[in-house]
Amino acid sequence: MKICVPINADNQLDSEICAHFGSAPAFLIVDTEDQSCHAIVNGNQHHQHGKCMPLQALQNERIEGVVVGGIGNGALSKLTAARLQVYISRQGTVRDMLVEFRAGRLGRMEPALACAHDAHGHV
């Protein structure tokens, strides 16, 4: 399965997961089977809160899921409308998250857990 993870800087699997999906400087695309990965720049990083366009940066990637530390309701709705699975992970490295993902310990992101439009509460 290929997943997208928002990251603070590209350090491959040792990249720190960004606390908020839409504000991430980059995304790491990871194959959960062989752990191959590559980073893409988030060209929409500096957007007005609530106006995230997550699929713009990911349009050329064949991903099935996204793992986030935090995400707004608008971006969550857009990702789920595109039939992507959205999982939640505490901040840490992508490598640490993969251990949890492969063990089936990541929960699904639900609208009730998403950041409100004018609040910045992150999980």
Image (cartoon, helix red, strand yellow):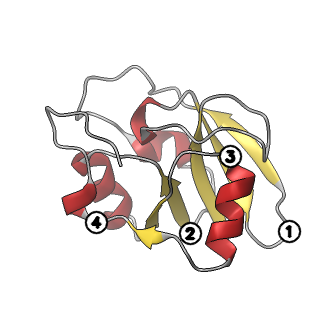
Q: CA distance from mark 3 to mark 1?
A: 17 Å
Q: Sequence order check: which comes first, mark 1 or mark 2?
A: 1
Q: Which amino acid type corresponds to the residue marked 4 in the rendered image?
A: Glu
Q: Residue at x 69, y 50 (%)?
A: 94
Q: CA distance from mark 2 to mark 3?
A: 20 Å
Q: Residue at x 73, y 32 (%)?
A: 10
Q: Which residue is mark 1?
A: 34
Q: Which residue is mark 4?
A: 110
Q: Is residue 84 visible?
A: no
Q: Sequence order check: which comes first, mark 3 or mark 1?
A: 1
- Circles 4 and 3, Cβ within 8 Å, touching? The answer is no
- Circles 1 and 2, Cβ within 8 Å, touching? The answer is no
Q: Which amino acid type corresponds to the residue marked 2 in the rendered image?
A: Glu
* Whether residue 29 is situated above or below residue 80 in the rendered picture: above
Q: Which amino acid type corresponds to the residue marked 1 in the rendered image?
A: Asp
Q: Sequence order check: which comes first, mark 4 or mark 2?
A: 2
Q: Quadrant of residue 15?
A: top right
Residue 67, image x, y percentages:
52, 57
Q: Which amino acid type corresponds to the residue marked 3 in the rendered image?
A: Thr
Of residues 15 and 3, which is closer to you in this image?
15
* Whether residue 32 is situated above or below residue 30 in the rendered picture: below
- Left or right of 76? Residue 106 is right
